[in-house]
Image: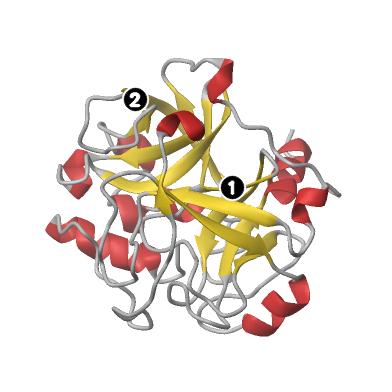
Amino acid sequence: MRRSFARLLALAATTAAIPLASPPTATADVVIGGHPVEISQAPWTVALSSRDRFGGTRAGQFCGGAVVGPSTVLTAAHCLTEDVLGAPPERIPDLKVIVGRAELQSNQGSEIPVRGTWVNPEYNAYTNAGDFALLTLAEPLPQSFVIPMAGAGDPAYEPGTGAAVYGWGDTTGAGDYAKSLRATPVHVLSDALCGKAYPGGAEGTYTADSMLCAGELHGGRDACQGDSGGPLVAQGKLIGVVSWGIGCGLAGSPGVYTRGSYITRALTAGG
């Protein structure tokens, strides 16, 4: 999830080391929170996979995603960078999306090849702005897999709203990666609080227009490495995509997500 995530992921990929290393600001006593969930409770949550790049220990999982159309998966732009994949995504022959599967090593669900990718041209790796991308699947999924996106002004974006983030990432901040899908309950936080937490610097800059903050004021519940691109859901709608932050579950450093309404607006403006 973190700004340092792409660098850590790229390093791990070159050595086929899974799980990934934890960030220096995350320690073993960080509790990310959460609980296992059945995939039937969140069929729109998917895993991005490349065994050639990341090995078979976790079925090649390296990021998450959300099904936003029968053939379309939304994820984070930083998941598809050459630093992470070792090459442009179109040159990764075994890039797949794992759907309908909670336990990564099970035979549940299916692994669908990626037919095409599109990375937001406005993505800025230094500020983390515009961190989203789309994957086109080689075969469509049933409409029941699709989660709707909350539009601008939706009450799901209001501070204090209960939400949940889904993924297979680090569960402690110490490299303890989940083998099965987990969900972590969090709350949408105010733009003022997030702007204070991330006023600008080496880790990135919080921009309310395109980003959304979620977590707990005193820390303890958050997304972490390996959850990037995964869905943040509130009131049955997608409100964000796991993007960046400092550490995992640390007080004063909530998770930052690419705002769903910004994604919708950017795609509409782009034609």
> In front: 3, or 185?
185
Q: Residue at x 33, y 80 (%)?
A: 29
Furthest-right residue in this view: 153
Numbered mark located on residue 120 in the image? 1
Q: Residue 214 at what x, y percent from top left?
A: 62, 64
The scheme the figure's colours follow is: secondary structure
How many discs appear?
A: 2
Q: Earlier in the sequence, mark 1 or mark 2?
A: 2
Q: Residue at x 76, y 36 (%)?
A: 268
163 is higher (above) or lower (below) than 221: above
Mark in the foreground, 1 or 2:
2
In this rendered view, identify the residue nearer to me: 72 or 223. 223
Residue at left offset 71%, top offset 78% = 193
- Type of amino acid under label 2: Pro
**Image quarter of the N terminus:** bottom left
Q: Badge 1 local density, few (<14 within 10 Å), some, or many (20+)? A: some
Q: Is residue 157 above or below residue 192?
A: above
Badge 2 marks a residue whose secondary structure is strand
Q: Is residue 63 above or below residue 28?
A: above
Rendered location of residue 246, percent (x, y): 48, 77
Mark 2 neighbour density, 10 Å: few (under 14) some (14–19) many (20 or more): some
Q: Which mark is residue 113?
A: 2
Is 105 displayed left or right of 203 in the figure? left
Residue nearest the observer in this picture, 251 or 51: 251
Label 1 to label 2, Cα distance in Å? 21 Å
